[in-house]
Structures are given as structure tokens and as C-alpha cells.
Amino acid sequence: DAGVTQSPTHLIKTRGQHVTLRCSPISGHKSVSWYQQVLGQGPQFIFQYYEKEERGRGNFPDRFSARQFPNYSSELNVNALLLGDSALYLCASSLAQGRLNTEAFFGQGTRLTVV
Amino acid sequence: AQRVTQPEKLLSVFKGAPVELKCNYSYSGSPELFWYVQYSRQRLQLLLRHISRESIKGFTADLNKGETSFHLKKPFAQEEDSAMYYCALLQGAQKLVFGQGTRLTINP
């Protein structure tokens, strides 16, 4: 099992552009969460999806959106990129949601640089 | 608001010395707390969770509700313990609230 996989690993975009980041969870995991990690900070929660529905949203502007597909993979979309969106974007998957299944397995992340 | 504070960004100790990484939290309710670790060039991974009350790689962490703390401890540090450590609090069903992290360096 390759674990949680994210693509691409690195990305450079220009201000104002749009970006799509992809995540494939561990086989059998139905919950996917997205986190943003700015240099020198801990990861910050953006979204959680479970069974293809949004179950949680962090304090991020509407430029950020996501979705989960029938195979439980997920995409994170960011519109109108700003320099401040430069960060490592982490995807985490878990078996289910709820306090009994809360071990989140993280991907390697996508390093987004906005210039 | 729920918050996790790790007061030390950097911590350096000698091999064989005791290690304590501090974590304080604010949470209204019964908290569920975790320590995550990121070794060089590896992904973020769970080290331990307070409900398991287990020792992983010699590390333990005790939840102190009176002091709202969940400090990570190891009696004898090893060089392979050098890594970035994050304390995290579970909010709701799946949202993890992370601290800023502590970079631990074990000197030979």
C-alpha cells in the first residue's frame, strides 16, 4: 500500500491563476481532509470530506473549494491565487469520521509556490 | 476558541538526556490529544494519542486537565529522535488543530 498519495509534488503558479491539487486516500478510507501548512507553522485545517459530502470547513475564503469523488479521491481547488497561498498542502485520510477512528494518515504534500 | 500552544520552536538536548516537549491546549469539553512527528524527508505521522495511554519509541505523554497540558517525554533521548514534533487537538469529528511545532535536535 502506497499510503496517501498527492499530486503534483511541486507546483509554481502566477498570482490570479487557478490550481487543482489531487489526493488519493489509502484504500478503504472514506474520509479525506485537507490542511495548509505555511512555513514555520503547524498544519491548518481547510476541509474534511466524508462519503463525498463536506463535513467540515476551516477559516478559509471562498476561493478555496474541494470535492470528493465516488472512489473517495479528492481535489482541492484554489481560485485567484495570492502570494499568501504559497504553502505545503497536505491531504490526510482516515477510515471514517468520529472519535473512534481518528488516526489520520498524511500524504507527502504538494508544495505550491505563487509568484 | 480551541488552541494548541507549543512554546518552544527549537529544543536541543544531548543524547541520553531526558526530553520534554511542552504542549498546552484550550478546549471546552473533554479533549482528545495527539502527538504527530515528522522525520527528515518523511511524511507527518502519528506518534501517540492520549486515549491509548501507550509508550511509542520510548515516548509517553500524560494529559493533565488541571494544567491543560499534554507534554511529551522521553527519559533518554536518542539521535534518531531528531525531528519536528506537533501536538494536535481533535475538534469535532475530524478537525485536527495543530500547534506550531517544536524542532527537536539530539546532539551526539
Image: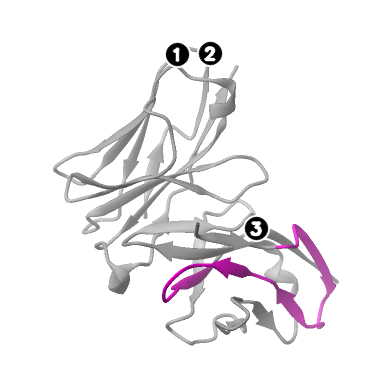
Mark 2: amino acid: Thr
Q: Residue at x 62, y 84 (%)?
A: B58
Chain under disc 3: B
Chain under disc 1: A
Magenta span has A86? Answer: no
Q: Secondary structure at mark 1?
A: loop
Same subunit, labels 2 and 1: the answer reads: yes
Magenta span has B15? Answer: yes
Disc 1 packing (10 Å; few <14; some 14–19; many ≥20): few
- The quarter of the picture where residue B6 lies is bottom right
Q: Position of residue B83 (x, y in %)?
A: 67, 62
Residue A17 tag number:
1
Q: Residue at x 59, y 76 (%)?
A: B68
**Magenta extent:** B7-35
Q: Nearer the viewer, mark 2 or mark 3?
A: 3
Q: Are marks 3 and 1 in contact (CB under 8 Å)?
A: no
- Quadrant of image for the C terminus of chain B: bottom right
Mark 3: amino acid: Gly
In space, the residues marked 2 and 3 are separated at their CA atoms by 30 Å
Q: Position of residue A6 (x, y in %)?
A: 40, 41
Chain under disc 2: A
Query: Which residue position is annotated with label 3?
Result: B101
Judge whether A41 appears above or below B74 on screen. above
Residue A2 visible, this angle: no
Query: Which residue position is annotated with label 2?
Result: A14
- The quarter of the picture where residue A106 lies is bottom left
In space, the residues marked 2 and 1 are separated at their CA atoms by 6 Å
